[in-house]
Image (cartoon, rainbow, N blue to C red):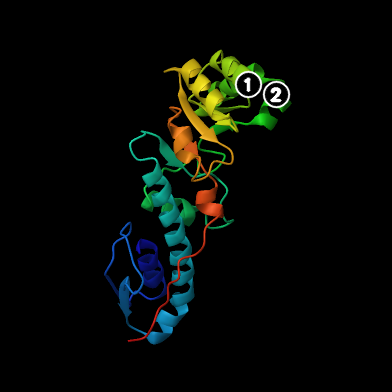
Amino acid sequence: MAFAQQVFNYVDEGLSMTVEIEDGSAVKYGDVAFYVSGSSQSILKAERLVLNAMQRMSAMATKTHHYVSLLDGTGTQILDTRKTTPGIRALEKWAVTIGGGENHRFALYDMIMLKDNHIDFAGGIRNAIAKTNTYLTQNHRNLKIIVEARNLDEVKQILQGENVYRILLDNFNYEDTRKAVALIGKQCLTESSGGINEETLRKYAECGVNYISSGALTHSVHNMDLSLKAV
């Protein structure tokens, strides 16, 4: 709804929009989300962008809300990823927050994530972490560091590094996730990722991780059916 208001205002400041349903509210078939009045030409100019964005954002917010409900009572938070549609990442990540989820990093500049290729190119986990900390110090940057672990041995190596904010447990099974959480303790936060779906989501949360990240929130949704009609 908030994005629709921005579009209508940008196209024609003379358009008047009356909101009937606030962002984050539950909806059912036949509900009226808003009324817009003013120049018919301006309404038609804005119509398709408004509908396309609202349909996609509503689908993402709905899926996120479903995932959040599956995690109820676990203390685990759901995160999106950078697996978004080129050009409209801001809208899609906005939709995740409307659905009750949390945003992961927006781009490469606001958090450092050392993944498998970074680690391998750097010559191992210890080198990757050390080089990252040196870079941050030399460039006076204050960025959080997330390091991906592929197995329990890598978790142990990461714990020997400095200034690690979160460990990403990538494609771990339940048993190893529980072992990793026990190893890490309070030293840093934990995140599970890799093929986690609505059938497995809560089981991973019950392993004790702080976060679960899911690209499916933004790349695997079916648009909500919305239309704008003259009255």
Q: Earlier in the sequence, mark 1 or mark 2?
A: 2
Location of residue 159 in the rendering, given as x and y in whole percent from the top left corner: 54, 16
Residue 207 located left or right of residue 22: right
Q: Quadrant of residue 112?
A: top right
Q: Residues within 10 Å of mark 1 (few under 14, many from 20)?
A: few
Mark 1 and 2 residues: CB-CB less than 8 Å, in contact? yes
Relative to 127, is 45 above or below? below
Q: Residues within 10 Å of mark 2 (few under 14, many from 20)?
A: some
Q: Quadrant of residue 210?
A: top left
Which residue is at a point 52% across and 62% down the rendered structure image? 222
Q: Amino acid at mark 1?
A: Lys
Which quarter shows the N terminus?
A: bottom left
Which quarter shows the C terminus?
A: bottom left
Location of residue 143 in the rendering, given as x and y in whole percent from the top left corner: 49, 30
Q: Nearer the viewer, residue 133 or 102?
A: 102
Q: Quadrant of residue 86?
A: bottom right
Q: Closer to the observer: label 1 or label 2?
A: 2
Q: Secondary structure at mark 1?
A: helix
Q: Which residue is mark 2?
A: 122
**Residue 142 visible in image:** no
Relative to 187, is 11 above or below? below
Residue 131 is tagged as: 1
Residue 25 located left or right of residue 226: left
